[in-house]
Image: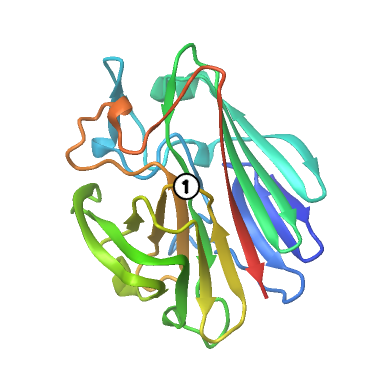
Amino acid sequence: MIHSIQSDLFTAEINDKGAELYSLFSKKTKTEYLWQGDPSVWDQRAPVLFPIVARLKDGKYSYNGKDYTMSIHGFVLDAPFTTLGSKGNSIILTYEDTPETRAIYPFSFTFRVIFTLQSNALEIVYQVINKTDGPMYFSCGSHEGYRCPRNEGETFEDYYLEFEKEADYSSLLSSSNILLTKSTYPVLENGKTLPLNYELFSNDSIVFANVPSNRVTLCSRKSNARLEIAYEDCPNLALWTRQNAPYVCIEPWYGLPDFEDTDGQLINKAGIISLEKGDVFSWKHTVTVFE
């Protein structure tokens, strides 16, 4: 089911399958800002990533002496969320562990996604509640794709990303099987403006570990509209697109893909979060459009 929330300036749609953002539409300019999915290019729009982000080595991990398998980005992106509460400008979607999830992820949890639309800003909050008798280990992240270009007469290369802070931005290098290596390469040196081109993504995703900025803005040289993603103290940021595809994904991550030299132990996984029984993990990112 697709749910709609409204502000005076925008409409946002959310699919209860995966709690996936489905649309971010400007009432003023009649502009859709979110990638709308295309099976021939990339059929998703903004998958929610939990309890891992990106790939596990060989698609598996170990915990307490037992091996488990899990596909890329975890399992909530296909999960049937339940509406916990809804009003005109906000909605809370929730998902609980099941016997099926515990067969691949041996923890009991509540996972919530809360969307709130205020004027030109969409706030998205992820909450994890540990109901396990002991600590649970997880990562989570967003994977929103934004139309790029948005307007007729523009190209992908007309766009650029502007980071909050001037700094050196280096990406972890991916191996041939798209796991991380310990090597890095410079993406932007002593700067804050990153012109977009498809060559940037020749190594698959750009992955900034311990990214220097807490916000980044998608801008066009041919139009005034700007889309800002603020992700508080979230440590990692990924950027991704496919060659010649008309979108760019801007992905704050609490976690990282596996490194190629991982030992496969969940508790040792790069970027893993440990949450004690009864505790709540909560983080927010906000998408703001300036027109």
Q: Nearer the viewer, residue 157 or 38?
A: 157
The quadrant where residue 241 appears:
bottom left
- Residue lying at 47% horizontally and 71% vertically, measured from the top left: 162
Left or right side of 155 for 287: right
Q: Quadrant of residue 156?
A: bottom left
Can you give x and y, in whole percent of width and height, for residue 278 in the image? Answer: 57, 18
Is residue 36 something that shows in the picture?
Answer: no
Q: Is residue 98 above or below residue 239?
A: above
Q: Is residue 22 above or below residue 198?
A: above
From the top left corner, tell me how far across and down residue 180 is, in percent.
24, 48
Location of residue 116 in the rendering, given as x and y in whole percent from the top left corner? 71, 49
Q: Quadrant of residue 194?
A: bottom left
Q: Residue at x 52, y 17 (%)?
A: 277
Which residue in the structure is indicated by mark 1? 234
Name the amino acid type tagged 1.
Answer: Cys
From the image, which quarter does the N terminus lie in?
Answer: top right
Q: Residue at x 40, y 60 (%)?
A: 239
- SS category of the residue bearing label 1: loop
Image vertical order of residue 199 relative to residue 154, above or below = above
Number of disc labels: 1
Q: Is residue 239 visible?
A: yes
**Scheme of colours in the image:** rainbow
Q: Nearer the viewer, residue 187 or 192?
A: 192
Is the residue 258 above or below the residue 27 in the image? above
Q: Residues within 10 Å of mark 1 (few under 14, many from 20)?
A: many
Return the residue nearer the eye: 137 or 247. 137
Q: Position of residue 187 (x, y in %)?
A: 30, 67
Q: Quadrant of the C terminus?
A: bottom right
